[in-house]
Image (cartoon, rainbow, N blue to C red):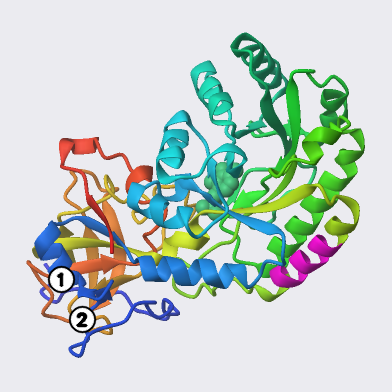
Amino acid sequence: MAMTEPAAPTHGMPLHAAPPFSTDATGALLLGGQTAVSLAARHGTPLYVVDSAAVRTRVASVRTLLPEGIRLHYAIKANPLPELLRLLATQVDGFDIASGGELALALDAGHRGAHLGFAGPGKRDAELAAAIDAGAVIHVESAGELARLAALARTAGQSARAALRINPDFELRRAGMRMGGGAQVFGIDAEKVPAVLAAWPANLTFAGFHIYAGSQNLDGGQVAEALRRSHALCTELAAWAPVADAHLVAQATPLRVFNLGGGFGIPYFAGEQPLDTAPVRAALADIARDHAAHFPETVLVLELGRYLVGEAGVFLTQVIDRKRSRGRDFLVCDGGMHQHLAASGNFGQVIRRDYPVWLARDLAARGDTTFTVCGPLCTPLDVLAREVMLPADVGPGDILAIGQSGAYGASASPAGFLSHPPAGQLLV
Ligand SMILES: *Cc1c(COP(=O)(O)O)cnc(C)c1O
């Protein structure tokens, strides 16, 4: 048997971007002015923490990209934490929701009526009825859903605002998750839209179009191109739109919306660059200019999820055990894939790569030892990071912070798996 252990894995890999958080005088990670270590001690681990100042800063930076008149919506599914929604209700112009549960959260947080867009396949009758009641813009995903909505509105004796979600005839190349183009469960195929508009149900108010090409795109040129093409497609299809009632046009709430999607990505993995927003700004300026000339009664909406909150949040987990097995050093933590599926690489990633992992007591620590960071589940899938460089003395009691965890965290994880308690969630 060989007595020398294999060498640690070698690292030619580019580094993660610098953490977007400040530190105290000792280098400890600060969130909302408190150390992550003290938050973990007070609130317990595992714990998601979202920094409200980082969210505000990000929203403000997005506003600088938007010409006058383009509205910014937050897609609640990225992170539905009620405290975060209350903050965002004051920062954005509306919420995009995708279930009756998200509708209730949106109403609780203080957005209502035409400031809500309700998309998603498979909306149940009760969800549609609640959305009609709330006056939300319902983004219809199929001809069948449009007929069902019309029948529900008739039964309720109410009118309803229906926008058509369009499955475009183009796709957002290189998007992390493609949600438009080709055969899709999302939206009505663009070529079928004129026929659907021609048979528009008399008791529904036509409220515009919605196009969502895909998520997590880090290429600013491609995001810009998708926005331009989405707007061009809305413009083309608007020729078939039912004629608007003049008295509705005069109302203060916008009659119609072109929701152009978003898909702005954030850098999760070593070597990824933040989105270059210059082409996006230029595209939005062109779109807004063209739009104002042709559709003064129609509002433009951009809907963003992870870009607004993803980098503002961390996942704090405590090291429970440290062990060495056949040349590899393991840190076993109290948080795992059941609370943070995305970091474990099991939330739609094609290639498993590591999220940034920081030592909370020393944010800048890069260290000299390579660790594999695992959760407590009895499955080899429960790996939070495969190769993290940390100081050699890291061990039980230390708090690790996983970055880029403000979106698709707790609510996108199989919390019931293995019956551990859920992670705490905190806005500071
Ligand atoms: C998920 C989703 C979003 C948000 O995606 P992000 O990548 O978090 O920005 C926006 N719009 C629709 C229709 C979605 O399904």
For the residues labelled 1 and 2, say whether their Cβ atoms are less than 8 Å apart: yes
Q: Position of residue 175 (x, y in %)?
A: 62, 55
Image point (14%, 58%), residue name: 43
- Quarter of image, res 163: top right
SS assignment at label 2? loop
Q: Position of residue 388 (x, y in %)?
A: 29, 72
Quadrant of the image containing the C terminus: bottom left
Mark 1: few/some/many CA within 10 Å (<14, 14-19, 20+): many
Q: Nearer the viewer, residue 369 or 108?
A: 108
**Above or below 68: residue 186:** above
Whether residue 380 is visible to the viewer of this picture, yes or no, is yes
Q: Nearer the viewer, residue 67 or 405?
A: 67
Mark found first going from the N terminus, 1 or 2: 2
Q: Position of residue 110 (x, y in %)?
A: 45, 45
Q: Viewed as shown, does residue 254 lie left or right of 428?
A: right
What residue span does the magenta drawing correspond to?
Answer: 280-289
Q: Is residue 205 magenta?
A: no
For the stretch drawn in magenta, the main secondary structure is helix
- Label tally: 2
Q: Tell me how far mark 1 sits from mark 2, CA to CA.
A: 8 Å
Q: Viewed as shown, does residue 265 lie left or right of 259?
A: left
Question: Label 2 belongs to which residue?
Answer: 28
Quadrant of the image containing the N terminus: bottom left
Residue 422 has which mark? none
Whether residue 355 is visible to the viewer of this picture, yes or no, is no
Image point (86%, 35%), residue name: 246
Image point (80%, 40%), residue name: 249
Badge 2 amino acid: Ala
Badge 1 amino acid: Val
Residue 37 has which mark? 1
